[in-house]
Structure formats: C-alpha cells, structure tokens
Amino acid sequence: MQAALTQRFTAVRGTARAARTSVRVQAAARPTWYPGATPPKYLDGTMLGDYGFDPLRLGSKDKDVLKYYREGELTNGRWAMAAVAGILFTDLVGLGPWWEAGAKVESSFDLKTLIIIEVVTFAILEGFRVKAYEKTGETGLGPFAPFDPLNMRSDETRLKELKNGRLAMLAFLGFSSQAAVQGKGPIECLQAHLADPGHNNIFTSSVGNEALAAVLVLSITPCLIEAKNRLQGTDEEEFRPLPCSLSHIFALSLGLHQVALRAAADQERLLALRRHDPRRVLPLVSRGFAQAAADADILWRRVQINLLTLSAESVPRFVRWLHAHAPAMRSLVLYGRALPTVAAALANNVDCLTAAVQRAAGLEQLDLPRALATPLLARLQPELLPRLRAVGADLALSHSSSSSSSSSAQGGAAPSCRQRRRSRDSGGMSEVEQATVNLLSLPALAELHIQSAMEAQLLGGLPCIQSRLRRLHFADVRDVPRGSLVAPLARLSALRSLRLSQRDGFHLPGPLTALCQLTALHAAVRYQDDPLVVSGHLKALSSLQALWLQHAAFEQPAALAALPHLRTLGLVGSAGQYAAVLTGLGAAPGPLPLEQLHLEAHASAVAEVPPEAWEALAALATCPRLRRLELPYNRLAALPEGAFLEGLQVLDLSNNSLMPGVPPALASCSQLSALRLDQQETAAPGDTAADVKVLSALADLQFVVTSAGHYSASHMQAGLRSAAEAGHLERLRAALPPSVHLTNSPSEWERSVGRLQALFEVNLRQERIRA
C-alpha cells in the first residue's frame, strides 16, 4: 500500500514538474519584463510590445478593453515624445526653465481665451480620434487613422514607436521630478552630474532615500515573485503594487456610490442616454469617480464596525488593528448587539480598547453600544480627546447609581466635575457614574445621543456641561420617574435641540420655559391614557422652529400659533386634538411660518381622526408657506380639498388603508414634486384611468412611491415584489411621463425626500462625519 502511494505521488509530482517546465519553455520563447517571468494567461505575446507586464490587471477581463488601453498608451507616448523634444529644445536654446516658458510667450490673447481655444481644439481632435478608433481599431492624427504619410508603417516601426513612447513617458517623469526636487532643467542637471557624478545624482538629492527604496523594491520584486512561485508550486505571475486593502477600499467606495446612483436616478433613462449620445455620459462618469474618491477619503477617516460580525477569536486582532489606525480616525462607530462570547471577549480587552480610542486625538464622533459604553467610558481620560464633540452611547443605569444620584440632587448642590473625578478616584463612584462623569467632562462635547436612561440629576447639575451641550437626544427614558428629567434639563443654557420620552405623563414646558433659546423639541409619553399635558406657557419657547409631540393634550391649542418661528410641527397619537390645534392655527391673526406638518393617528392604536379635523385642515389658510404635508396611518378615505394644497411640494399619504386610489384633490397641487401613495390595502393607486389623469396633470411631479397592495416593511426594504406589484409599476411607468421616477421602495423615499421624524431620531450610525 505504501509503495503504491509513493509511486502515485512520484508520478503526480513528475507530471506537475513537466507541466511547469513546459510553461517555462513557452514563456522563454519570447522576451518578458524580467528573465524567466511567467506572463498572465491573457498576455499571450500576440500584441506588439507585450512583455507580460500588467500589474494592475487592466486587461484580465476583456481583450477589447486591452486594445483600447494599448491605443491610450500609444497616444500618451506620442504626447510624451513631443513634450520631451520641446523641453530639450527649450533648455538648449536658453529660453529659461521649461516649466515657465509658456508664461513668457507674448500673445494678444489672455489666459482664459487661450484655455478656451485649447479645450475646443482638443475636444474636436479627440472626437475625431475616438471615431477613427471605432472604425479602424487604431488612432492617428485627427480623422486620419492610421496616420502614415511616408508609408513607413510596419510591425518593426510600430514596435519602435511604442518603445520610444514608453521611454519618453519615463523621461518626462524624470524631467518633472528634476524640476520639483532641484529646480533645474534636464540639460543643467546633466551638466552638473557630468561635472561631479559622485555628489550630483539622485541618491544625494533630497529624495535620495526614497529613490534608493524604490530601486531596491524594483530590484527584488522579481526575486520575491519567483521565490513565492517555487514555494507554492505555481507559475502564475503575481505582481500587484496596489495593496489589497487599498483596492478593496476603493472598490467598496465605488460600490457605495453606485448604490446611491441607482437610488437617485432611473437606470432606464441612463441606458437610453448612453445609447443615443455617448459623449453626454462623460460628466456622469467624471462625477462618479470624483464621488468615489471622496467616499474613499471618508472611509480612510471613518471606522464603522457591527459587533455582530465579530467572533470571540477575532476581538484581540480587532483591538490591535484599531490601536494601530487610531491616530488617523475622525469617526468611530461601534454598533450592534454582540454575541455573549464576543461581549465577554470585549470585556477582557476593554482596557486595550480604551487605550486605542484614547490614541485617536483627532476623533470627532464616537458611538458605542451597550456592551462597551459603560466600561469604556468609565476608563476614559477625557483630556486625551480634545476634539470629540458628538457621542452616542447606550448606557446601562443601575438602581444603586440612580438612587445615589437622586439623593445627591435632593441633599444639596451637585458637585463639580473635578470633585466628581476626585470621588471617583477614591472609589466612591459606581461604574455608571464614572462613565457619566467622564462623558460629560469631554472638553468639546456638544452633541449627546443616549440610547437608554442616564442620571438626569448629574446631567443637569454639572457646571462643566451646562454652557456647552447644544444637542441632547434620549431614545428611551421611560424608567425615569415622572417628570424628573425636566427640571435638571432646564439648567442646560446652551441647549438647542432636545428629545425626551417617558413612560408616564408630565407637564410641558414646565421648568423648560427657561430654555428660551431651544429651537427643536421632541416630547413623548408611552401611553395615551397618561398624556403629555401642554400648557399655554409653551409660547415662552419663542425660538422653537421644530416641535414633535406624541400623546399630547393641549390646554390652549392656540398657543402653537403664538410661536413666531415654528416651521415644523408633528402630532402623533393625538387624533382627538387635531381639530382644536388646526382651528387654533387657522385663527391666527396673521400668516404663520409653518412649512412642514405631520399628522399621524397610528400611535393611538385604534383611534381614527374625526371628520372635523379634516374640515379644519381644509380651512387652513394662515400657512401660505406650507410645503410638506405627511398624513400616514390615518385611515383616510379621501384627501380634503383646500387652499393648503396649492403650495405643497411633498405629500405623504402612505398606509391609509381606506383610500381607494389617487385622490382627485391632488389636481390642486400644482407645485407637487414628490408623492407617496404606497401601502394601501384596498387599492393600487395609479391603475385606473382617473388616477393616471390626475398624476399626469401634475407638471412638476418628479418622484412617486406606490405599490399594488400592503406589504411588510422587511419585504419592501429588500426590494421584493410580486408579479402583481411588477405589473402595476410597469403599467404606471408606461402611462406617466418619462421624467417621473417611479418606485415601490420606502427606503428610496427616505434617501431622496427624507422624513420629518428623522430630525429627532437617535441614530448611533451617523452616515456623515461632522466637519
């Protein structure tokens, strides 16, 4: 048995050795970029100048593309030969430095005119060149392709032209490098080198070390390739100067941009554009690459990790990587619910992870999930992060820390940051208190997003935070006793945006009347039977521009009309109060600045909006600037007609299960550009001739979201659709003008048009780095 296995192994090894020998013999039959190199399979030697060198793998997918790259190489080589000749002539004649020669030429045209002439001339020549390539597969001079007035065209002369072009491109690179490093032209540099070769060369210049490193790398690269091939038993050439990580990042950023492009534009229109006029695609491609470069730049500075994708074994490696790259970071977002084993591994490495975060001196944004927020912040040294201004955290509040903070607030004035830190160092604080004090002691902290409750008394009692915190959003403070947040928050004198929600009802604004500078306020309670009582003192918040209320009971509904700068208003789950509020707005003595209005009865579970509310909406004439109206989850059967429709630009009527189709009242929306009609259980808006007539009459309509029925949110987000859904969309696309972008995806609506509620949402995954 052993003898048979040995014989078989020897035979297989001999076959492999014979195959490798055969390949090497074939490779040696033509010259390669280094002796003995094995070219890639697609570089078979049939193309002139093919030496098996393609480190970027540009021609690995399509030989036609490879031919186009070859023509591009020839064109660049020809320009390089002309440039090298011009530079040498300029230096020999003594016209001064070649990079300044153009500025010394006297001309009757100014620089702008010369640029316009050059752009127009070369655009015409490039147009001729592209058309010539499409016809003949080669390029030349203008419409002449190939350009051979002396009848010298042969394989030998074409190869010489290619080699001289490559040499000229290297020469031009050398001339440019000499000018940048030495400030001299090629002739002057040559004379200095001939006079003293030992002291005037590239290795004694200011970039000598870099040049030496480049020479060493280029010299040993073939040896490394051959060594790898010998060890791995393969003959595939692998020379890739771009690191895998960089190429992956660029591919990822380009993919992100392509996703955004698909979401923002109709692919069918883009395909039609490409078919009819290829030249108009160039701006799209240019913008695409520019956006991809910007995305790549952001990806270098931003790190976003979903803890659910980590394993317990990869946590130490992740922490080491984070520690190495921390100095370049501006944004660190860690989110997701870690598995129990991963959470334990993170707890074992929390000291190293804290040290890595503290190395990021330029960090501006930090988001932490529950598995890391409290232990990491408790160990943090705030003074090491001087630029950190936006923090999102999921803090776990223990009962002991809550009771201790309450007792300290009731017993006297809250201690200062320095006193708190001294107490912490002596062991008198719990981990949550330490994390809270460290968090609030960050020198530049201005935005705070809290995913769960924290010590409200500590937040409002620390003088070091009162004059700096401008944005404070709580996602869930329902375990905090009734109204205990309101009084401490009133001490935050710099606060501009506030979001809070509690389990029990409380009075608004209460002590918050001291925050006369507040511009955005979101207030909510969980249950309708214990409402949020809004008093007439709300008008004391005279700077409010955005107000969102859930389960609110108004003592004086007309108080909203007394807010002079209110532009955005959202009422959720207060269907019985709609009529009173809208009537109060309509009774205002003058025009109101209200631009965006959201009315949603869904949060009240079963309540429907009374008809008098829609009558009050139709009678609303004091809001001439109303541009956006959102009426989801209201069980609307029809859209009321009124003067408020005339100026609307965005209208959301989704999830109104009683609506039979497109409301006829939409004909009054002469300025409407975005419309949402999806998730109607009883109809497919747009399937009838009457629906199409109304939609076609909207001259400014550009974006429509519709569906053929009610689907779950996960179903729609995944882009799934039934045969009925696909047919509905196709029929509507054929009936509407091509300028209307039609989709059934709510996520496209959110990306393109947005949501009013997003002004107040706590999102630990901010997609932008704050400048």
Image (spheres, helix red, strand yellow):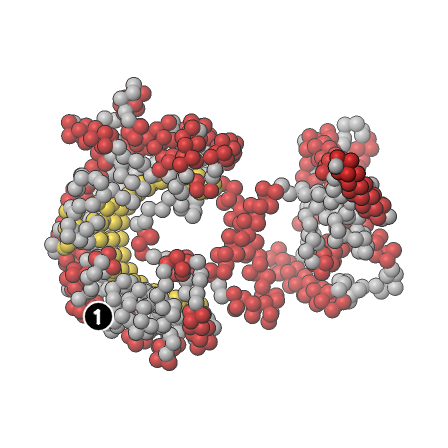
**Residue occupying image coordinates x 30% and y 35%:** 396
Residue 383, picture quadrant? top left
Q: Amino acid at mark 1?
A: Ala
Label 1 neighbour load within 10 Å: few <14, some 14-19, many 20+? some
Q: Quick one: which residue is furthest to the front in this view?
A: 1
Whole-percent x, y for residue 225 in the image? 73, 38
Q: Quadrant of the N terminus?
A: top right
Along the line of sight, the residue nearer the viewer: 6 or 258: 6
| Whether residue 602 is situated above or below residue 463 in the rendered picture | below
| Whether residue 193 is situated above or below residue 541 in the rendered picture | above
Whole-percent x, y for residue 226 in the image? 76, 37
Query: Is 670 on the left-hand or right-hand side of 117?
Result: left
Q: Quadrant of the C terminus?
A: top left
Whole-percent x, y for residue 576 in the image? 16, 61
**Residue occupying image coordinates x 41% and y 39%:** 339
Along the line of sight, the residue nearer the viewer: 87 or 704: 704
Whole-percent x, y for residue 537 in the image? 14, 49
Along the line of sight, the residue nearer the viewer: 234 or 758: 234
Residue 696, picture quadrant? bottom left
Query: Is 378 on the left-hand or right-hand side of 87?
Result: left
Which residue lies under the disc numbered 1?
618
Query: Is 201 on the left-hand or right-hand side of 324?
Result: right
